[in-house]
Image: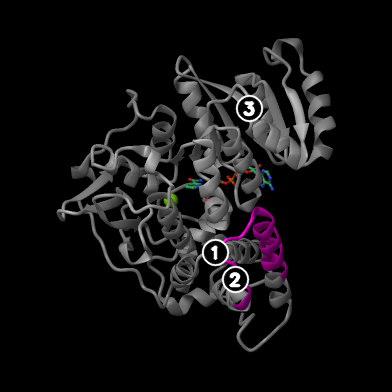
Amino acid sequence: MKAISVLGSTGSIGTQTLAIVEEFPERFRVVALTAGRNLDLLIDQIRRHAPEVVALADAEDVPELRRRLEALDPSQRPLRQPELLGGGEGLCAAAAWCSAELVVTGIVGCAGLLPTLAAIRAGKDLALANKETLIAAGPVVLPALQASGSRLLPADSEHSALFQCLQGTPWADTARLSTGVPTPGLRRIQLTASGGAFRDWPAADLAKATVADATSHPNWSMGRKITVDSATLMNKGLEVIEAHYLFGLDYDHIEIVIHPQSIIHSMVELADSSVLAQLGWPDMRLPLLYCLSWPERLETPWRRLDLTEVGQLTFRAPDQAKYPCMGLAYAAGRAGGTMPAVLNAANEQAVALFLEERITFLDIPRLIEAVCERHGPDLQQNPSLDDVLAIDAWARRATSELAATPSPTLLTA
Ligand code: NAD
Ligand code: MG
Protein backbone atom coordinates (compact mmCIF):
# COMPACT_ATOMS: atom_id res chain seq x y z
CA MET A 1 0.00 0.00 0.00
CA LYS A 2 1.53 3.26 -1.07
CA ALA A 3 0.96 6.17 1.32
CA ILE A 4 -0.06 9.31 -0.58
CA SER A 5 -0.41 12.96 0.37
CA VAL A 6 -2.60 15.22 -1.73
CA LEU A 7 -1.84 18.95 -1.70
CA GLY A 8 -4.80 20.95 -3.02
CA SER A 9 -7.18 18.03 -2.43
CA THR A 10 -10.35 20.02 -3.20
CA GLY A 11 -9.25 21.09 -6.69
CA SER A 12 -9.49 19.39 -10.06
CA ILE A 13 -6.20 17.47 -9.66
CA GLY A 14 -6.89 16.72 -5.99
CA THR A 15 -10.38 15.29 -6.48
CA GLN A 16 -9.27 13.18 -9.45
CA THR A 17 -6.37 11.78 -7.41
CA LEU A 18 -8.69 10.86 -4.56
CA ALA A 19 -11.06 9.19 -7.04
CA ILE A 20 -8.14 7.00 -8.16
CA VAL A 21 -7.30 6.14 -4.55
CA GLU A 22 -10.93 5.08 -4.06
CA GLU A 23 -10.72 2.93 -7.18
CA PHE A 24 -7.61 1.13 -5.90
CA PRO A 25 -8.14 0.87 -2.12
CA GLU A 26 -5.81 -2.13 -1.90
CA ARG A 27 -2.95 -0.16 -3.52
CA PHE A 28 -3.11 3.39 -2.16
CA ARG A 29 -4.04 5.11 1.08
CA VAL A 30 -4.18 8.81 1.91
CA VAL A 31 -2.15 10.10 4.86
CA ALA A 32 -2.28 13.89 4.35
CA LEU A 33 -4.63 16.38 2.73
CA THR A 34 -4.29 20.14 2.27
CA ALA A 35 -6.87 22.57 0.95
CA GLY A 36 -7.89 26.21 0.64
CA ARG A 37 -11.44 27.19 1.55
CA ASN A 38 -13.84 24.45 0.45
CA LEU A 39 -14.57 22.96 3.89
CA ASP A 40 -17.69 21.05 2.79
CA LEU A 41 -15.76 19.03 0.25
CA LEU A 42 -12.74 18.70 2.54
CA ILE A 43 -14.86 17.25 5.37
CA ASP A 44 -16.32 14.72 2.96
CA GLN A 45 -12.76 13.78 1.91
CA ILE A 46 -11.65 13.44 5.54
CA ARG A 47 -14.60 11.13 6.24
CA ARG A 48 -13.82 8.94 3.23
CA HIS A 49 -10.03 8.76 3.58
CA ALA A 50 -9.32 9.24 7.32
CA PRO A 51 -5.96 10.99 6.77
CA GLU A 52 -3.46 11.38 9.60
CA VAL A 53 -3.11 15.12 9.03
CA VAL A 54 -5.04 17.90 7.32
CA ALA A 55 -3.72 21.41 6.68
CA LEU A 56 -5.67 24.50 5.62
CA ALA A 57 -4.05 27.37 3.73
CA ASP A 58 -5.47 29.89 6.20
CA ALA A 59 -4.79 29.09 9.89
CA GLU A 60 -7.89 31.10 10.86
CA ASP A 61 -10.11 28.46 9.24
CA VAL A 62 -8.78 25.65 11.46
CA PRO A 63 -11.14 26.19 14.48
CA GLU A 64 -14.14 26.13 12.15
CA LEU A 65 -12.93 22.84 10.59
CA ARG A 66 -12.34 21.36 14.07
CA ARG A 67 -15.77 22.44 15.25
CA ARG A 68 -17.49 20.96 12.22
CA LEU A 69 -15.61 17.65 12.46
CA GLU A 70 -16.47 17.34 16.15
CA ALA A 71 -20.12 18.15 15.44
CA LEU A 72 -20.49 15.28 12.97
CA ASP A 73 -22.95 12.59 13.91
CA PRO A 74 -20.93 9.63 15.34
CA SER A 75 -21.97 7.49 12.35
CA GLN A 76 -20.49 10.15 10.02
CA ARG A 77 -17.17 10.64 11.81
CA PRO A 78 -13.91 9.58 10.15
CA LEU A 79 -12.16 6.48 11.48
CA ARG A 80 -9.66 8.76 13.18
CA GLN A 81 -9.63 12.49 13.96
CA PRO A 82 -6.77 13.95 11.92
CA GLU A 83 -4.21 16.32 13.30
CA LEU A 84 -5.29 19.77 12.06
CA LEU A 85 -2.74 22.35 10.92
CA GLY A 86 -2.99 25.72 9.21
CA GLY A 87 -1.10 28.48 7.42
CA GLY A 88 2.14 28.23 5.47
CA GLU A 89 3.91 26.22 8.15
CA GLY A 90 0.99 23.83 8.44
CA LEU A 91 0.96 23.23 4.67
CA CYS A 92 4.71 22.51 4.72
CA ALA A 93 4.41 20.16 7.71
CA ALA A 94 1.61 18.24 5.96
CA ALA A 95 3.66 18.13 2.72
CA ALA A 96 6.62 16.64 4.61
CA TRP A 97 4.45 14.27 6.70
CA CYS A 98 6.63 11.34 7.78
CA SER A 99 4.47 8.39 6.69
CA ALA A 100 3.92 9.67 3.12
CA GLU A 101 5.82 8.08 0.24
CA LEU A 102 4.43 10.14 -2.66
CA VAL A 103 3.12 13.71 -2.60
CA VAL A 104 0.69 14.86 -5.31
CA THR A 105 1.13 18.62 -5.80
CA GLY A 106 -2.30 19.90 -6.82
CA ILE A 107 -2.05 23.42 -5.34
CA VAL A 108 -2.49 26.04 -8.04
CA GLY A 109 0.21 28.65 -8.61
CA CYS A 110 3.38 29.66 -6.84
CA ALA A 111 1.55 29.08 -3.53
CA GLY A 112 2.69 25.49 -4.05
CA LEU A 113 6.39 26.36 -3.95
CA LEU A 114 7.16 26.13 -0.23
CA PRO A 115 5.07 22.97 0.40
CA THR A 116 6.68 21.33 -2.65
CA LEU A 117 10.16 22.19 -1.39
CA ALA A 118 9.24 20.87 2.06
CA ALA A 119 8.21 17.54 0.48
CA ILE A 120 11.45 17.40 -1.53
CA ARG A 121 13.61 18.18 1.48
CA ALA A 122 11.84 15.39 3.39
CA GLY A 123 12.88 13.01 0.58
CA LYS A 124 9.37 12.34 -0.74
CA ASP A 125 8.70 11.39 -4.34
CA LEU A 126 6.47 13.91 -6.07
CA ALA A 127 3.69 13.68 -8.61
CA LEU A 128 4.16 17.15 -10.05
CA ALA A 129 0.96 18.81 -11.24
CA ASN A 130 1.82 22.25 -9.81
CA LYS A 131 4.06 23.28 -12.70
CA GLU A 132 4.25 26.92 -11.52
CA THR A 133 6.59 25.81 -8.72
CA LEU A 134 9.15 24.34 -11.10
CA ILE A 135 8.86 27.27 -13.48
CA ALA A 136 9.25 29.91 -10.78
CA ALA A 137 12.01 28.17 -8.89
CA GLY A 138 13.76 25.71 -11.22
CA PRO A 139 17.22 26.93 -10.08
CA VAL A 140 16.22 26.18 -6.46
CA VAL A 141 14.11 23.04 -6.97
CA LEU A 142 16.61 21.14 -9.16
CA PRO A 143 19.52 21.26 -6.66
CA ALA A 144 17.08 20.39 -3.83
CA LEU A 145 16.04 17.27 -5.76
CA GLN A 146 19.66 16.29 -6.27
CA ALA A 147 20.42 16.78 -2.59
CA SER A 148 17.46 14.76 -1.29
CA GLY A 149 17.16 12.06 -3.95
CA SER A 150 13.44 12.80 -4.39
CA ARG A 151 12.03 11.86 -7.76
CA LEU A 152 9.82 14.23 -9.71
CA LEU A 153 7.22 12.22 -11.61
CA PRO A 154 5.33 14.38 -14.10
CA ALA A 155 1.54 14.49 -13.66
CA ASP A 156 0.99 17.09 -16.38
CA SER A 157 -0.46 15.05 -19.27
CA GLU A 158 2.13 16.20 -21.83
CA HIS A 159 5.11 15.53 -19.59
CA SER A 160 3.64 12.22 -18.48
CA ALA A 161 3.40 11.34 -22.18
CA LEU A 162 7.07 12.25 -22.69
CA PHE A 163 8.01 10.31 -19.56
CA GLN A 164 6.04 7.28 -20.77
CA CYS A 165 7.62 7.47 -24.24
CA LEU A 166 11.08 7.53 -22.71
CA GLN A 167 10.58 4.31 -20.75
CA GLY A 168 12.46 1.64 -22.62
CA THR A 169 14.90 4.09 -24.20
CA PRO A 170 18.52 4.47 -23.06
CA TRP A 171 17.18 7.28 -20.92
CA ALA A 172 14.91 5.09 -18.77
CA ASP A 173 16.92 5.72 -15.60
CA THR A 174 14.54 8.21 -14.01
CA ALA A 175 17.24 9.48 -11.75
CA ARG A 176 18.01 11.62 -14.78
CA LEU A 177 14.72 13.51 -14.50
CA SER A 178 15.37 17.10 -13.52
CA THR A 179 19.14 16.93 -13.41
CA GLY A 180 19.38 19.71 -15.97
CA VAL A 181 21.58 17.36 -18.05
CA PRO A 182 20.40 16.68 -21.61
CA THR A 183 18.70 13.35 -21.93
CA PRO A 184 20.85 10.84 -23.87
CA GLY A 185 19.32 9.85 -27.19
CA LEU A 186 16.53 12.46 -26.97
CA ARG A 187 16.68 14.87 -29.89
CA ARG A 188 13.42 16.79 -29.80
CA ILE A 189 10.23 17.18 -27.81
CA GLN A 190 6.90 18.05 -29.40
CA LEU A 191 4.29 19.23 -26.91
CA THR A 192 0.76 18.99 -28.22
CA ALA A 193 -1.79 21.72 -27.47
CA SER A 194 -5.55 21.59 -27.96
CA GLY A 195 -5.53 25.27 -28.86
CA GLY A 196 -7.71 26.27 -25.88
CA ALA A 197 -11.03 28.09 -25.79
CA PHE A 198 -10.24 30.45 -28.70
CA ARG A 199 -8.78 27.91 -31.09
CA ASP A 200 -11.42 28.61 -33.72
CA TRP A 201 -11.86 32.35 -33.03
CA PRO A 202 -10.40 34.89 -35.46
CA ALA A 203 -7.59 36.85 -33.76
CA ALA A 204 -9.56 40.08 -34.22
CA ASP A 205 -12.35 38.80 -31.92
CA LEU A 206 -10.05 38.18 -28.94
CA ALA A 207 -10.39 41.81 -27.84
CA LYS A 208 -13.96 41.09 -26.77
CA ALA A 209 -13.31 37.71 -25.10
CA THR A 210 -15.13 37.50 -21.77
CA VAL A 211 -14.31 35.55 -18.61
CA ALA A 212 -17.07 33.06 -19.47
CA ASP A 213 -15.56 32.57 -22.94
CA ALA A 214 -12.04 32.05 -21.58
CA THR A 215 -13.06 29.60 -18.86
CA SER A 216 -14.73 27.06 -21.14
CA HIS A 217 -12.24 24.54 -22.50
CA PRO A 218 -13.09 22.40 -25.54
CA ASN A 219 -11.43 19.14 -24.35
CA TRP A 220 -10.36 19.25 -20.69
CA SER A 221 -12.18 20.09 -17.45
CA MET A 222 -9.72 21.88 -15.13
CA GLY A 223 -9.41 24.67 -12.55
CA ARG A 224 -10.14 28.26 -13.66
CA LYS A 225 -6.56 29.54 -13.70
CA ILE A 226 -5.17 26.77 -15.92
CA THR A 227 -8.22 27.04 -18.20
CA VAL A 228 -7.44 30.72 -18.83
CA ASP A 229 -3.77 29.75 -19.31
CA SER A 230 -4.95 27.31 -21.97
CA ALA A 231 -6.95 30.05 -23.70
CA THR A 232 -3.88 32.35 -23.88
CA LEU A 233 -1.62 29.34 -24.64
CA MET A 234 0.51 30.49 -21.69
CA ASN A 235 -0.14 27.01 -20.30
CA LYS A 236 1.78 25.57 -23.24
CA GLY A 237 4.51 28.18 -22.78
CA LEU A 238 4.82 27.22 -19.10
CA GLU A 239 4.94 23.57 -20.19
CA VAL A 240 7.87 24.34 -22.50
CA ILE A 241 9.82 25.62 -19.48
CA GLU A 242 8.59 22.66 -17.41
CA ALA A 243 9.87 20.27 -20.11
CA HIS A 244 13.21 22.06 -20.18
CA TYR A 245 13.70 21.56 -16.44
CA LEU A 246 12.39 17.97 -16.44
CA PHE A 247 14.19 16.62 -19.49
CA GLY A 248 17.20 18.93 -19.81
CA LEU A 249 16.65 19.81 -23.49
CA ASP A 250 17.46 23.32 -24.70
CA TYR A 251 14.63 25.50 -25.99
CA ASP A 252 15.55 25.03 -29.66
CA HIS A 253 14.57 21.38 -29.30
CA ILE A 254 11.20 21.83 -27.56
CA GLU A 255 8.34 22.59 -29.96
CA ILE A 256 4.60 23.19 -29.72
CA VAL A 257 2.15 21.68 -32.18
CA ILE A 258 -1.60 22.34 -32.21
CA HIS A 259 -3.54 19.06 -32.13
CA PRO A 260 -7.23 19.88 -31.67
CA GLN A 261 -8.38 16.34 -30.77
CA SER A 262 -6.08 16.06 -27.68
CA ILE A 263 -5.50 12.35 -28.34
CA ILE A 264 -1.71 12.43 -28.78
CA HIS A 265 -0.50 13.87 -25.48
CA SER A 266 3.04 14.63 -26.70
CA MET A 267 5.90 13.14 -28.70
CA VAL A 268 9.63 12.52 -28.43
CA GLU A 269 12.03 12.30 -31.34
CA LEU A 270 15.05 10.10 -30.65
CA ALA A 271 18.57 10.34 -32.06
CA ASP A 272 17.86 7.85 -34.88
CA SER A 273 14.84 9.99 -36.01
CA SER A 274 12.22 7.62 -34.52
CA VAL A 275 9.24 9.50 -33.09
CA LEU A 276 7.31 8.00 -30.16
CA ALA A 277 3.91 9.29 -29.03
CA GLN A 278 1.55 8.46 -26.17
CA LEU A 279 -2.16 8.37 -26.98
CA GLY A 280 -5.35 8.32 -24.94
CA TRP A 281 -8.62 10.15 -24.34
CA PRO A 282 -8.13 13.56 -22.70
CA ASP A 283 -8.47 12.31 -19.10
CA MET A 284 -6.12 13.45 -16.33
CA ARG A 285 -6.71 10.26 -14.38
CA LEU A 286 -4.25 8.36 -16.56
CA PRO A 287 -1.19 10.56 -15.96
CA LEU A 288 -2.12 10.78 -12.28
CA LEU A 289 -2.50 6.99 -11.99
CA TYR A 290 0.85 6.47 -13.73
CA CYS A 291 2.56 8.72 -11.17
CA LEU A 292 0.99 6.66 -8.39
CA SER A 293 1.70 3.23 -9.89
CA TRP A 294 5.03 3.87 -11.68
CA PRO A 295 6.89 1.80 -12.73
CA GLU A 296 3.94 -0.59 -12.69
CA ARG A 297 0.83 -0.43 -14.89
CA LEU A 298 -2.45 -1.12 -13.15
CA GLU A 299 -5.47 -2.69 -14.82
CA THR A 300 -8.34 -0.19 -15.18
CA PRO A 301 -11.90 -0.49 -16.50
CA TRP A 302 -11.61 2.98 -18.09
CA ARG A 303 -12.97 3.69 -21.56
CA ARG A 304 -10.47 2.37 -24.08
CA LEU A 305 -9.18 4.46 -26.95
CA ASP A 306 -10.89 3.79 -30.26
CA LEU A 307 -9.18 5.57 -33.12
CA THR A 308 -11.96 4.71 -35.54
CA GLU A 309 -14.28 6.70 -33.26
CA VAL A 310 -11.82 9.61 -33.28
CA GLY A 311 -11.54 9.39 -37.07
CA GLN A 312 -8.90 12.02 -37.65
CA LEU A 313 -5.82 13.27 -35.86
CA THR A 314 -4.81 16.67 -37.21
CA PHE A 315 -1.90 18.99 -36.51
CA ARG A 316 -0.90 22.54 -37.28
CA ALA A 317 1.73 25.04 -36.27
CA PRO A 318 0.68 27.47 -33.52
CA ASP A 319 -0.17 31.06 -34.47
CA GLN A 320 2.52 33.11 -32.70
CA ALA A 321 0.87 36.47 -33.47
CA LYS A 322 -2.52 35.42 -32.10
CA TYR A 323 -0.95 33.91 -28.97
CA PRO A 324 2.00 36.10 -27.84
CA CYS A 325 2.23 34.27 -24.48
CA MET A 326 4.07 31.38 -26.12
CA GLY A 327 6.82 33.69 -27.37
CA LEU A 328 7.04 35.40 -23.98
CA ALA A 329 7.51 32.02 -22.29
CA TYR A 330 10.25 30.93 -24.71
CA ALA A 331 12.02 34.26 -24.18
CA ALA A 332 11.78 33.96 -20.38
CA GLY A 333 12.97 30.36 -20.49
CA ARG A 334 15.95 31.29 -22.64
CA ALA A 335 16.81 34.21 -20.36
CA GLY A 336 16.72 31.70 -17.48
CA GLY A 337 17.50 32.46 -13.82
CA THR A 338 14.76 34.58 -12.27
CA MET A 339 12.99 35.48 -15.54
CA PRO A 340 10.62 32.47 -15.56
CA ALA A 341 9.61 33.40 -11.99
CA VAL A 342 8.69 36.88 -13.20
CA LEU A 343 6.80 35.48 -16.19
CA ASN A 344 4.89 33.12 -13.92
CA ALA A 345 4.05 35.67 -11.23
CA ALA A 346 2.99 38.32 -13.76
CA ASN A 347 0.82 35.71 -15.46
CA GLU A 348 -0.80 34.60 -12.19
CA GLN A 349 -1.56 38.19 -11.26
CA ALA A 350 -2.80 39.15 -14.73
CA VAL A 351 -5.07 36.08 -14.89
CA ALA A 352 -6.46 36.92 -11.43
CA LEU A 353 -7.18 40.49 -12.58
CA PHE A 354 -8.82 39.18 -15.74
CA LEU A 355 -11.01 36.77 -13.72
CA GLU A 356 -12.06 39.76 -11.59
CA GLU A 357 -12.92 41.59 -14.85
CA ARG A 358 -10.45 44.37 -14.10
CA ILE A 359 -8.46 43.92 -17.32
CA THR A 360 -9.23 42.54 -20.77
CA PHE A 361 -8.07 39.24 -22.21
CA LEU A 362 -5.51 40.98 -24.44
CA ASP A 363 -4.10 42.88 -21.47
CA ILE A 364 -2.78 39.57 -20.07
CA PRO A 365 0.17 39.22 -22.50
CA ARG A 366 0.74 42.98 -22.56
CA LEU A 367 1.17 43.14 -18.79
CA ILE A 368 3.41 40.07 -18.70
CA GLU A 369 5.65 41.47 -21.43
CA ALA A 370 5.96 44.83 -19.69
CA VAL A 371 6.83 43.27 -16.32
CA CYS A 372 9.40 40.89 -17.85
CA GLU A 373 11.00 43.86 -19.64
CA ARG A 374 11.26 45.77 -16.37
CA HIS A 375 12.97 42.81 -14.73
CA GLY A 376 15.63 42.46 -17.46
CA PRO A 377 18.36 44.57 -15.82
CA ASP A 378 17.83 42.84 -12.44
CA LEU A 379 17.87 39.26 -13.70
CA GLN A 380 19.79 36.86 -11.44
CA GLN A 381 21.09 33.63 -12.93
CA ASN A 382 21.49 31.67 -9.68
CA PRO A 383 18.85 32.95 -7.28
CA SER A 384 18.32 31.64 -3.76
CA LEU A 385 14.85 30.71 -2.51
CA ASP A 386 14.57 34.12 -0.82
CA ASP A 387 15.48 35.82 -4.10
CA VAL A 388 12.75 33.88 -5.92
CA LEU A 389 10.14 34.72 -3.27
CA ALA A 390 11.09 38.41 -3.35
CA ILE A 391 11.00 38.55 -7.15
CA ASP A 392 7.67 36.72 -7.25
CA ALA A 393 6.18 39.32 -4.86
CA TRP A 394 7.72 42.20 -6.84
CA ALA A 395 6.34 40.91 -10.16
CA ARG A 396 2.81 40.60 -8.72
CA ARG A 397 2.97 44.18 -7.40
CA ALA A 398 4.40 45.48 -10.68
CA THR A 399 1.62 43.76 -12.65
CA SER A 400 -1.11 45.29 -10.48
CA GLU A 401 0.52 48.73 -10.63
CA LEU A 402 0.81 48.61 -14.40
CA ALA A 403 -2.77 47.41 -14.73
CA ALA A 404 -3.94 50.36 -12.63
CA THR A 405 -2.03 52.82 -14.83
CA PRO A 406 -3.98 53.45 -18.01
CA SER A 407 -1.64 53.79 -20.96
CA PRO A 408 -2.12 53.77 -24.72
CA THR A 409 -1.11 50.11 -24.84
CA LEU A 410 -3.08 48.88 -21.85
CA LEU A 411 -6.75 48.54 -21.06
CA THR A 412 -7.94 48.75 -24.60
CA ALA A 413 -11.44 47.39 -23.95
P1 NAD B 1 -7.90 24.08 -8.87
O1 NAD B 1 -8.11 25.54 -8.80
O2 NAD B 1 -9.01 23.20 -9.31
O3 NAD B 1 -7.45 23.56 -7.40
C1 NAD B 1 -6.44 24.20 -6.67
C2 NAD B 1 -6.29 23.60 -5.27
O4 NAD B 1 -5.29 24.37 -4.57
C3 NAD B 1 -7.55 23.65 -4.41
O5 NAD B 1 -7.59 22.54 -3.55
C4 NAD B 1 -7.37 24.94 -3.60
O6 NAD B 1 -8.05 24.90 -2.37
C5 NAD B 1 -5.87 24.92 -3.38
N1 NAD B 1 -5.31 26.27 -3.21
C6 NAD B 1 -5.60 27.37 -3.96
N2 NAD B 1 -4.90 28.44 -3.52
C7 NAD B 1 -4.14 27.98 -2.49
C8 NAD B 1 -3.19 28.60 -1.64
N3 NAD B 1 -2.89 29.92 -1.74
N4 NAD B 1 -2.58 27.85 -0.70
C9 NAD B 1 -2.87 26.54 -0.58
N5 NAD B 1 -3.77 25.90 -1.35
C10 NAD B 1 -4.39 26.61 -2.30
O7 NAD B 1 -6.60 23.85 -9.76
P2 NAD B 1 -6.24 22.58 -10.66
O8 NAD B 1 -6.82 22.72 -12.00
O9 NAD B 1 -6.46 21.32 -9.89
O10 NAD B 1 -4.67 22.80 -10.85
C11 NAD B 1 -3.74 22.52 -9.83
C12 NAD B 1 -2.34 22.51 -10.43
O11 NAD B 1 -2.23 21.42 -11.33
C13 NAD B 1 -2.01 23.77 -11.22
O12 NAD B 1 -0.66 24.07 -11.01
C14 NAD B 1 -2.23 23.36 -12.66
O13 NAD B 1 -1.41 24.07 -13.56
C15 NAD B 1 -1.83 21.89 -12.61
N6 NAD B 1 -2.47 21.07 -13.64
C16 NAD B 1 -3.82 20.89 -13.61
C17 NAD B 1 -4.43 20.11 -14.58
C18 NAD B 1 -5.92 19.85 -14.53
O14 NAD B 1 -6.41 19.04 -15.30
N7 NAD B 1 -6.66 20.48 -13.64
C19 NAD B 1 -3.67 19.54 -15.60
C20 NAD B 1 -2.29 19.74 -15.60
C21 NAD B 1 -1.70 20.50 -14.60
MG1 MG C 1 -0.72 19.97 -19.57
Quadrant in the picture for residue 381: bottom right
Q: Amino acid at mark 3?
A: Ala
Quadrant in the picture for residue 204: bottom left
In the rendered view, would you say 23 is above or below 373?
A: above
Front residue (pair 4, 214): 4
Callout 2: SS: loop
384 within the magenta span:
yes
* Residue where numbered disc 1 is placed: 337
* Residue where numbered disc 2 is placed: 379
Marks 1/2 in contact by CB < 8 Å: the verdict is yes
Left or right side of 147 for 359: right
Front residue (pair 62, 132): 132
Quadrant in the picture for residue 62: top right
Mark before the other along the chain sequence, 1 or 2? 1
Q: Residue at x 33, y 51 (%)?
A: 262
Q: Amino acid at mark 2?
A: Leu
Residue 46 location (% of width, % of height): 66, 23
